[in-house]
Image (spheres, grey):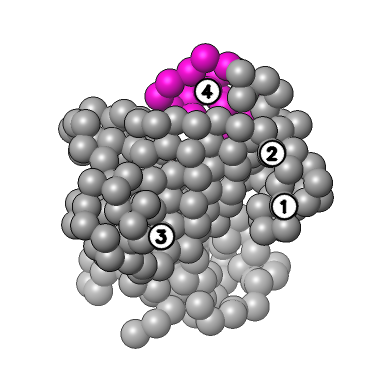
Amino acid sequence: MPETARPTGKAARLREYLTGLIDGGLQPHDRMPTERDLAEQFQTTRLTVRRVLDQLGHEGRLYRTQGAGTFVSEPRIAKSVDLTSFTTDMRARGLKPGSLGTHVECIAAGAEVGAELHISPRDLVVHITRVRTADGVPMCLEHCYMPAALVPGLETLQWDGSLYEVLSQTYGLNVEKAEQSIRATVLGADDATALSVPEFSPAFRVQRVAFDARGRRLEFALSTYRADRYSYDMVIYRNPGNS
Ligand code: 16G
């Protein structure tokens, strides 16, 4: 996105007024006041008004339609790739989520997991391994690691189902953001058996670090999805700053 200087003076007041309209009463696709009305109201030039509108356009808050005017954009955050749990993902597809072979242990983080969770390799983590199923069919193999200090007693708790629900309901921990990387892989013999597919079948390997609203690292997870049963769908937007 091109950097545009922040407006000052009248432009700053105009910007404040417009963001107030967007955040206040107006709904997505509602029409904004015209350039001419804004120029009159703020006793400034139409060029200044256009610059402010352009900037809000670059930020994805407004869009312009030739000849029709300027309108409020849909909020982007809700439209980007959603952060979901396996359970909500499957329910959204009309499938019944389940788990097989759940194994929970409390172990030292070690170098890799410690680095991802920003804790010492000697600190304890709760490690959960499970095969996640949809309508009973194995879909994904998961390894999740959480700092044991954040989830005391999780390894002895009787639970089955959604980890994120347990984190929220038992520990008051809510995942708000995750950093993820996705890459292609093929399944080795053990993983292939766990997922009921032939050895060397294709899969997605997703690595996630999940954070709460305070920015604490709650989870490091490695999820291996069967490529024949899973797809990554996303809504993508044209950046108004690019042609
Ligand atoms: C997803 C997450 C995984 C998380 C799990 C919780 C990805 C790539 N991974 O599988 O990190 O532990 O959901 O699901 O999305 P649950 O609440 O159904 O147990």
Q: How far apart, in angstroms, are the residues tagged by discs 3 and 4?
A: 24 Å
The circle on residue 107 is 2
| Cβ at disc 1 under 8 Å from ligand 1 | no
129 horizontally vs 16: left or right: left
Residue with the mark numbered 1: 110
> Camera-side residue: 210 or 235?
210
Q: Which residues are magenta?
A: 157-176
* Residue extending farthest front: 189
**Mark 1 or mark 4: which comes first in sequence?**
1
Magenta-span inclusion, residue 170: yes
Compute the Cα span from label 3 to label 1. 21 Å
Disc 3: which residue: 205
Residue at mark 4? 166
Estimate the x, y position of residue 49 in percent, counting from the top left.
50, 71
Is disc 2 in contact with disc 1, using a CB cutoff of under 8 Å? yes
Amino acid type of the residue that numbered disc 1 sits on in the rendered structure: Gly
